[in-house]
Image: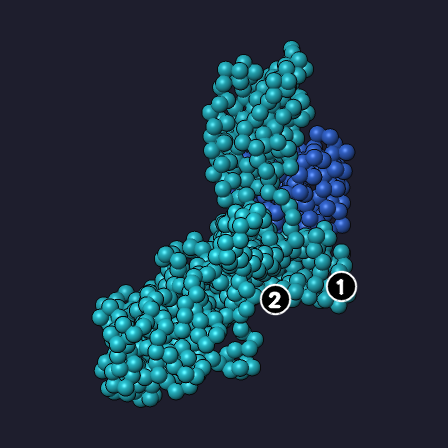
Amino acid sequence: MADMDFEKFKKLFLQEADEQLEIMEKGVLQLEENGEDRKVIDEIFRMAHSLKGSAGSMGYTAIASLTHEMENVLDKLRTGDKQLNDEIVDLLFISIDTLKNLRQNVEKGSHEEDEGEIEHLLFQFRDISAASSDKKDSAVEKKMVLTTEEVQLFKDKFQEKNKFLICFELIHQQEMQSMLAFLILNNLKDEGEIVKTLPDGLEDVEGDLPFFSLLMGTEKSPEELGAVIQQSVEQDEFTIYSWEDIEQGAARNFFQEMKETFVRRDVSRDSIRVDIEKVDQLMKLVGELVIDKERLLEISKNIKAEGRDNEDAQALLETIPHVDFIATELHESVMDIRMYPVGSIFKRFPRLVRDISRQTGKEVRLEFSGEDTELDRTILQEVFDPLVHLVRNAIDHGIESPAEREAQGKSATATVALNAWQEENNIVIEVKDDGAGIDPEKIKTRAIQRGLLTEKNAEEMDRESILDLIMEPGFSTSETVSDLSGRGVGMDVVRTNIEKLDGEVEIASEPEKGTSISIVLPLTLAIVQALMIVEKNADYAIPLSAIFETIAVGENNKKELIKTVKNREVVIWREQVIPLIRLSDFFNLGELREEGFLIIAGVKGKMVGIMVEDVRGEQEIVIKSLGDFLGKDKLFGEIPGISGATIKGNGEVALILDIQGMLRCFKKGGDLIER
Amino acid sequence: MSAKVLVVDDASFMRLNLKNILESEGFEIIGEATNGVEAIQQYKAENPDIVTMDITMPEMDGLVATEKILEFDPNARIVVVSAMGQESYIKKAIMKGAKNFIVKPFKKDKIIDTMNKALQG
């Protein structure tokens, strides 16, 4: 469009948009007051529809996308597929407001529209639209199969007439392919009789349809049919095979290619939508099943031990391993259903990064990698806020101003990368920037000022432990407190939230080069392998992932293993000196015991020896939260060292030890903090 | 000879847009209608070679108008103009006898191509 024309169009567009928005707003107000009204919905629909059309033509994609989603929901209301509710009304209001803003942007000429601006709205609409949608994806057959009878019938029926197989490959038309197929089919119906289509039921297929074919008997010549088809598609998009051609296998290549295309497509497309609550319910049931399975395993141990040898006992012993196997497989399958790509939350960052960099006057480019990495949906939801915080911190505190960067010989535009990958049984999500990095000396000084650390302790600490100090409550090295990242309470909260998920936060940083903060998360929650231990008649579980070794401690080895250094008990393990916790002492259970088992456990290279009375063995445990009773402001307050509870095979409860939490009860330097 | 076109759409923006595109390729716009009722009146009065027909319009929508026009003139060439996501309406229009369809937002080449294809029939 020429400039003059464009201005003319723009003016007209704005004028109409005003009217359309006004009518839409009035309509939604009416809906809010009087409830569902078909006429009003139709009116809003029409306005959204018109606005979408003109915005699309003008290239205002944000407006077009938003109105498109509005239209989808409104259409669902029209057809009765959806009932009007407050959520929809609110969403419509917000959308109209957003559209008004977008319209203002267009008028100001800053029609630099960002999809991110409206992305959250689009998602909400899509959620609503998808919720009760039960339209089936086209089931597509992979080749055209004619039975011998069908061939005979076909031949008999059209003896003297022409028999054609017409194969289509839509190479020029990318949009609305199924609609073109429908159009062609409809036009050819007047030219003869279509006896079979591929895919079957061609007229009801929706969406992409690059390949299709049909078999027909007709009085017409191939040329006449070709002319009809060319009213819809190009000459090189279809081939007409005669019956003789078919019998000689001329169409084989077409079917081969078509098959490959569909096989590729099916991999990604055969899916159904399931309410997440149903999956969670299934997960809960599987959890219960795992508990029962453990109980069965225990019963089978008892039967074996007692040598009960009747038929039923034998049958039970044979069945239990199978139940064990099935329960484990079932657990894995359900976990798999709950997996979600990390990219689904990465998508929400471009907008955020843009806003923060504008507010802070910094230039930031956002990069992603590993968006396809999958993570349990629950974990993924919990991890979003901590990630937001990390990204904010990176831009607000980490990245220098463009001028500073240039002075240092860096490019003015900084890079923040969100990376995800799988590492054994963990998923790592990293927020990495190429900003100023963290200066360990500054942190030391600040930590000493804040009384988090004595100067002497600071001397002894390694670089990593110093960096970890920024996650201590109340720590902040930023000279100015900004609106964005607050007062450094953030990193503490980040760590707490991630640890709640049984994850870890790792910090690596180099001054002037940048900072990398990684969130290391377990692949799945809820069911883990654990070592069951006993102390003072109670059972505890320690996640196996944290355990390095279990050593029986008796007269013969206790003097070598356990020493007292500076009035502190320590364990000498593989030439390392690590702190010792006696579980009775830690939980104030009374008298200490000299002999028993020493569990060497550790997280992130920090080790601890835990002295316990007895070890029962390994077991799969289902983690149950104690959320309602334990923790800040809860009934029993915070109890360090316990992360949850599980139900044992015999129905009793065992507490799950939180090794990280226990480690944190040591001051830097090794003394146990008074609790 | 240039084909005579009746443009039917309730949005004047859309009509202007279509008109510009079609005129630049030598089509002659002989009328514009803003709803189905007007479309039928103008079809009868002007006898165009081809009609571009929006579907969602006030008073009488494009589906009904298509049906009525084809009742009046079984050889009428009607191209429905509709948006992505409105497949079911397009299908209905095709079943009623529309010659082809255009999807909004549209590209100039695509419109011209579609119009020419429809004029062949």
Q: Is residue A531 above or below residue A201?
A: below
Q: Secondary structure at mark 1?
A: loop
Chain cyan in the figure, letter: A
Amino acid type indicated by mark 2: Ile
Nearest-to-viewer mark from 1 and 2: 1
State the residue position of label 2: A94
Image side of residue A202 versus residue A498, left or right: right
State the residue position of label 1: A35
Q: Are marks 1 and 2 in contact (CB under 8 Å)?
A: no
| Mark 2, other Cα within 10 Å: few <14 / some 14–19 / many ≥20 | few
Q: Is residue A443 above or below residue B113?
A: below
Image side of residue A110 versus residue A37, left or right: left
Measured from the top left, where is residue A317 in percent x and y?
52, 50
Measured from the top left, where is residue A372 in percent x and y?
43, 53
User: Which quadrant of the view contains residue B41?
Assistant: top right
Residue at mark 2: chain: A
Q: Is residue A228 visible?
A: no
